[in-house]
Amino acid sequence: MKLVLVRESRFCGMLGFACLVSLLLRSWCRVMFYVGHFFAAGSDPPKRAAFDRLWQYEHVRRV
């Protein structure tokens, strides 16, 4: 059980670090877009294309 907790906390730590760095570089939306892209579309080409088309909307880039 402890191994699972360590593994998951490492993932959360890396994601938190990436978000912190992206805040400093003012590219927060871009990083979170790709994280959402990975979890929502995976490796399915039609889903990936549909998700990529969302970037054209201003509110998507700001959220």
Image (cartoon, grey):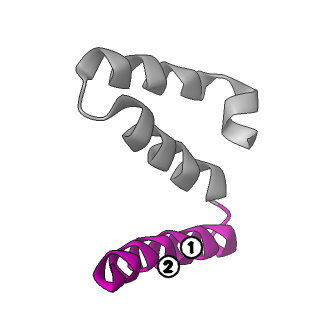
The three-letter amino acid code for the residue at tag 1 is Gly
Residue 23 location, x and y as percent?
68, 69
Give the answer, above or below, for where 32 lies relative to 40: below
Q: Residue at x 67, y 75 (%)?
A: 24
- Quadrant where the N terminus is found in the figure: bottom left
- Find residue 52 and report its image quarter: top left
Q: Is residue 35 left or right of residue 20?
A: left
- Mark 2 touches mark 1? (CB < 8 Å): yes
Residue 28 location, x and y as percent?
64, 58
Q: Secondary structure at mark 1?
A: helix
Mark carried by residue 3: none
Circle 2 is placed at which residue position?
A: 13
Residue 16 location, x and y as percent?
56, 73
The three-letter amino acid code for the residue at tag 2 is Gly
* Cα distance between the residues tagged 2 and 1: 5 Å
- Range of residues picked out in magenta: 1-26
Q: Label 2 neighbourhood size at 10 Å, few (<14), some (14-19), many (20+)?
A: few
On whether residue 46 falls in the magenta region, the answer is no
Give the answer, above or below, for where 2 lies relative to 4: below
Give the answer, above or below, for where 41 lies relative to 6: above
Circle 1 is placed at which residue position?
A: 16
- Find residue 42 and report its image quarter: top left
Q: Residue at x 49, y 69 (%)?
A: 15
Q: Label 1 neighbourhood size at 10 Å, few (<14), some (14-19), many (20+)?
A: few
Q: Is residue 43 left or right of residue 18?
A: left
- Quadrant where the C terminus is found in the figure: top right
Q: Residue at x 74, y 41 (%)?
A: 62
Per the picture, the main secondary structure of the magenta-coloured stretch is helix
Give the answer, above or below, for where 17 lies relative to 52: below
Residue 3 location, x and y as percent?
29, 82
